[in-house]
Image: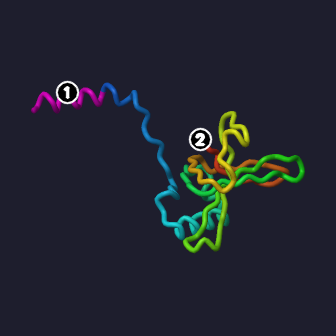
Amino acid sequence: MRKCIVAGIFFLSVFSSAFPAAKKIDIDFTKMGKTMAYAMLYNICFDQEKYIGKTMRIKGSFFMTEGERDGAKFYSVMIYDATACCQIGLDFIPRGNKKYPIDFPKDMEEIEITGTYSVTNKYGFEYFYLDVEEMP
């Protein structure tokens, strides 16, 4: 029995570096009920600076809109409260060479994304978005 324990500890110490550690998720909307997720995202929209740098995982309906000025594409994940009467969205920008519509779901299809809440300057305004690291 002792040999098995020692071998197990050896195996874990040698091979644990081969497997990357799971990324820490600061806010996981996927583990919240609909009303709580809606309320949390609503709070983020009104106190955005507090959440910059936080890693978030969110599941909801995909939605794409185009900017009126230059046709730039804006991607959002929309979540609904428990009664589905109210919705709120979180804009995101995927990393990599994602092409719309090939690499994205259709409008209103479910999507789950993970990323870091960030801010940039767009059209002379602060633009808050989720910098998406993981997108199916």
- Tell me if label 1 and label 2 are in contact, CB under 8 Å: no
Residue that label 1 marks: 7
State left or right for residue 18 relative to residue 135: left
Residue 15 falls in which quadrant of the image?
top left
Q: Residue furthest right?
A: 69
Q: Quadrant of the C terminus?
A: top right
Figure check: 118 above or below 37 = above
Residue that label 2 marks: 133
Magenta stretch: dominant secondary structure: helix
Instruction: Return the x and y of residue 5 as percentages of the image width and height.
Output: 16, 32
Figure check: 64 above or below 3 = below
Between 81 and 95, which is closer to the camera in this rendering?
81
Instruction: Return the x and y of residue 51 as percentages of the image width and height.
Output: 60, 56
Residues in magenta?
A: 1-13
Q: Quadrant of the N terminus?
A: top left
Instruction: Return the x and y of residue 11 as percentages of the image width and height.
Output: 27, 27
Give me the residue at 55% from left, 52% from top: 56
Name which residue type carries label 1. Ala
